[in-house]
């Protein structure tokens, strides 16, 4: 699977639609061991949504991005809804934004000629740290635009593939 970017000692690998049984097992263990997705069935299901994997110099998974396609009634368009999880001891400043950028760049190219394809990426901010002034700046630097809050009070951001 192709390395599409590097960040400090990490490599970011594009795995969209390429997960193998071995990689799925690693992802399930990664989420379980780090308290991200404790339910084994939900973790297995999510392995089919993984877009990028960040690995450290030892080849261990330290971060994952995943996307699923859904229609946003609020914006009346289909989006790739984005999620990411970075292992706590690997949350270097900049790794999560780089994983987001890699995911965005790859998806923007993947379906560029398909009129029915999602128009961009949508991010529902579940991490309270992203609600701080610094977190908002990080989101804005990633090209995200704030759309408001959902019914659970979480910030909703998007970035279109073509402005």
Image (cartoon, rainbow, N blue to C red):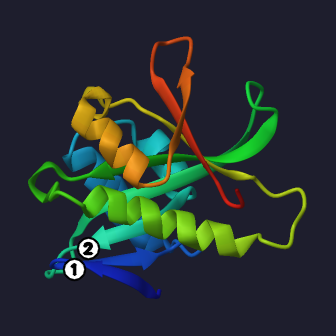
Please tell me which residue is depicted at 32% across the width and 43% down the height of the picture.
137
In-image side of 35 versus 65 (left or right): left
Image x and y of residue 45, in percent: 54, 48
Q: Which numbered disc covers residue 55?
A: 2
The answer to whether residue 16 is seen in the rendering is no
Numbered disc total = 2
**In the rendered view, does 118 fall on the left or right side of 51?**
right
**Is the C terminus in the top left, top right, bottom left or bottom right quadrant?**
bottom right
Q: Residue at x 27, y 56 (%)?
A: 30
Mark 1 element type: loop
Q: What residue is drawn where x is 57% and y is 76%?
A: 18
Q: Is residue 70 above or below residue 62?
A: above
Whole-percent x and y of residue 19? 52, 71
- SS at badge 2: strand
Q: In terms of depth relative to the viewer, which is nearer, 91 or 93?
A: 93
Q: Which mark is residue 59?
A: 1
Where is residue 110 shown, x and y percent of the image? Answer: 70, 74
């Amino acid at each position: 699977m192709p390395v599409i970017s590097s960040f400090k000692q990490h490599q970011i690998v594009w795995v969209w639609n390429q997960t193998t049984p071995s990689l799925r097992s690693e992802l399930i263990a990664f989420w379980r061991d780090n308290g991200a997705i404790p339910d084994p069935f939900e973790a297995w299901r999510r392995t089919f949504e993984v877009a990028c994997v960040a690995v450290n110099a030892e080849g261990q998974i330290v971060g994952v991005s995943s996307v699923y396609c859904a229609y946003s009634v609020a914006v009346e368009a289909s989006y790739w809804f984005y999620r990411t999880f970075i292992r706590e001891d690997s949350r270097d400043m900049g790794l999560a934004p780089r994983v987001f950028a890699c995911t965005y760049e790859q998806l923007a190219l993947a379906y560029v000629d398909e009129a029915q394809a999602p128009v961009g990426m949508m991010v529902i901010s579940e991490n309270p740290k992203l609600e701080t002034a610094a977190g908002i700046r990080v989101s804005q630097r990633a090209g995200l635009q704030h759309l408001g809050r959902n019914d659970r009070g979480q910030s909703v951001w998007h970035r279109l593939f073509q402005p």
